[in-house]
Amino acid sequence: MTRNLDPTEQLRAAEAVPGFARGANRSERILAAVSVAGLYVGLAMAMESGISGTGGVFTFLAALSLALAWWWYHLGAPGRRPHTRTEKSTFLFTVMTLAIPGLSLIWGDGQNGLAAHLVAAAVPTVGLALYLVMRWRR
């Protein structure tokens, strides 16, 4: 007597439950905005400062940990709907594009210039911001 629902039916069923499809509260949104700003500033400053390879590895791992922390928070938060395919794709985009500043942090020499560093930091930051905004909807 098991019911196999496709993902569309699962989302429809989840949204029908009153407490299951709640959106993000105010403190979560503020923390997300601080996380996004911190990711951007941290990546851009680390690339611009030309830190050593070991420091770049730790900076890259911190940025990756920040993104993964949000993923695991949304995955395990009670009362949240399942991830949609678009949200999963956006998060994958975020993680994959962390390689852009990661390459500069680990193997770069910091000589690319400020504009290049700002753009490299902006790409994964925009991905994380889009993912978080998509998760906020009810």
Image (cartoon, rainbow, N blue to C red):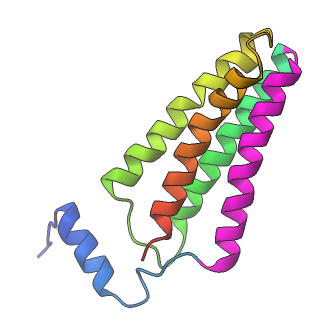
Give the answer, above or below, for where 103 lies relative to 46.
above
Residue at image position (57%, 52%) is 129
Of residues 66 and 132, which is closer to you in this image?
132
> The C terminus appears in which quarter of the rendering?
bottom left
What segment carries the magenta color? 25-52
Q: Quadrant of residue 35?
A: bottom right
Main secondary structure along the magenta-highlighted residues: helix
Q: How many marks?
A: 0
Is 108 drawn above or below residue 15 in the view shown?
A: above
Query: In the shown orientation, is residue 100 left or right of residue 60?
Result: left
Q: Where 105 sits versus 72, above or below?
A: above
For residue 20, above or below residue 82: below
Q: Is residue 100 magenta?
A: no
Viewer-nearest residue: 71 or 99: 99
Where residue 28 appears, x then y in whole percent? Answer: 66, 71
Find residue 4 and report its image quarter. Answer: bottom left
Q: Residue at x 15, y 72 (%)?
A: 2
Residue at the image position 70 percent from the left and 75 percent from the top: 27
Residue 73: quarter of image = bottom right
Image coordinates for residue 116, horizontal then vertical, percent: 68, 21
**In this view of the protein, which residue sits in the foreground, 13 or 130?**
130
Q: Position of residue 128 (x, y in %)?
A: 56, 48
The answer to whether residue 77 is left or right of residue 8 is: right
Image quarter where the N terminus lies is: bottom left
Residue 29 within the segment the image draws in magenta? yes
Q: Residue furthest left?
A: 1
